[in-house]
Image: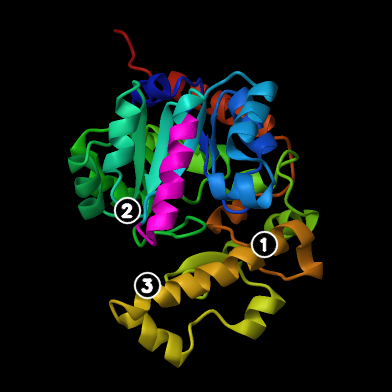
Amino acid sequence: MDDSKFTQAAGIETPVICGAMYPCSNPELVAAVSRAGGLGIIQPVSMIYVHGHELRAGIKFIRSITDKPIGFNALVEKSSSRYEKRMREWVDIALEEGIKFFITALGNPKWVVEEAHSIGGVVYHDVTEGKWANKALDNGVDGLICVNNRAGGHAGALSAEKLYEEVSPFKVPLICAGGISTERDYVKALATGYSGVQMGTRFIATVECNSHSDYKEVIVNASEEDIVLTDKISGVPVSIIRTPYIEKQGVKAGPIAKYLLKGNITKKWMRMIYTLRSFFQLKNASQKGKGYLEYFQAGKSVRGISSVEPAGEIIKRFAKAADSWKRENAPRTP
């Protein structure tokens, strides 16, 4: 494992990313991770529509907490021309505010790559298998966020090890995303060959995350077996925590929705309906807790989360564990 290319490009000390999360990426959490030496990522929809900060003002607020590097998440799907125009405006604001590390997902990252590279920035792209990695690299990305089958949100289908086997031949920095919550998980990812890790669920259960305490409590108390996949959020499988509400509602789309999700045109509209509905459900559940809905996204990393703690303490523990592992595995001089 050589994390230097990634850490140098990001300008950070510890190769740990706090993944962009809707609705949980509040600016205080982003700042706390970066301040501790990791990399906090801004999720613009979360920043603006959940936490109430105009994007530029939100970035400046983060800067008032820490002057360490932060990153920006650009979802580059072409769901509508209006959305694409808005995302381009947000990326321009991020660039104007000095952000140089971008994570793209759900589409062709080429335009983000062109804009970021024009100011000396870098772009890493979310992938779940080798063919998507190949396409992203053809469009100029600098590294890959490798989303495995233990991730929260839109999880992949491959294990961290299998995904590494598929994408390591591309010879770019690889970040392991999914199933990381303990020092042991972290060191295992580094030993596999990853340049760093991305965590989401672990950082929800932190002091700085302003999601409702009910959400954090459910994460702390959940087991790996409590994580189920539902296609009722976006039309494709998303990892959530099984709760009484989820048990009652079910996790599978109904027959009509399933039929519509198969059509090339109707699929787009059905996914839009699901996304708009879940936009408010996830937002309100994260802010209002069980009194609203027991509708909480999380990955299988819940297995290793036993308490709510400061984000900086997590980064410190991981950095210490990595240093110990590196020393133990350093080449011996004769």
Residue beneath label 3, please? 268
Residue beneath label 1, please? 222
**N-term mark: 1 or 2:** 2
Image depth: mark 1 or mark 3 in front:
3
* Image height of 236 relative to 54, above or below: below
Q: Residue 67: x, y in percent?
A: 60, 18
* Image height of 254 relative to 41, above or below: below
Q: How many labels sit on residues?
A: 3
Name which residue lies at 51% across and 68% down: 275
Report the span colored magenta: 78-94
Separation of residues labelled 1 and 2 (CA atoms): 32 Å
**N-term mark: 2 or 3:** 2
* Quarter of the figure that contains the C terminus: top left
Residue 331, image quadrant: top left
Q: In the structure shown, which secondary structural element does the residue marked by tag 2 occupy?
A: loop
* Image height of 220 relative to 66, above or below: below
Magenta-span inclusion, residue 107: no
Mark on residue 23? Answer: none
Name which residue lies at 46% across and 57% down: 150
Depth order, front residue of 11/79:
79
Residue beneath label 2, please? 107
Q: Is residue 248 visible?
A: yes
Residue type, numbered disc 2:
Gly
**N-term mark: 1 or 3:** 1
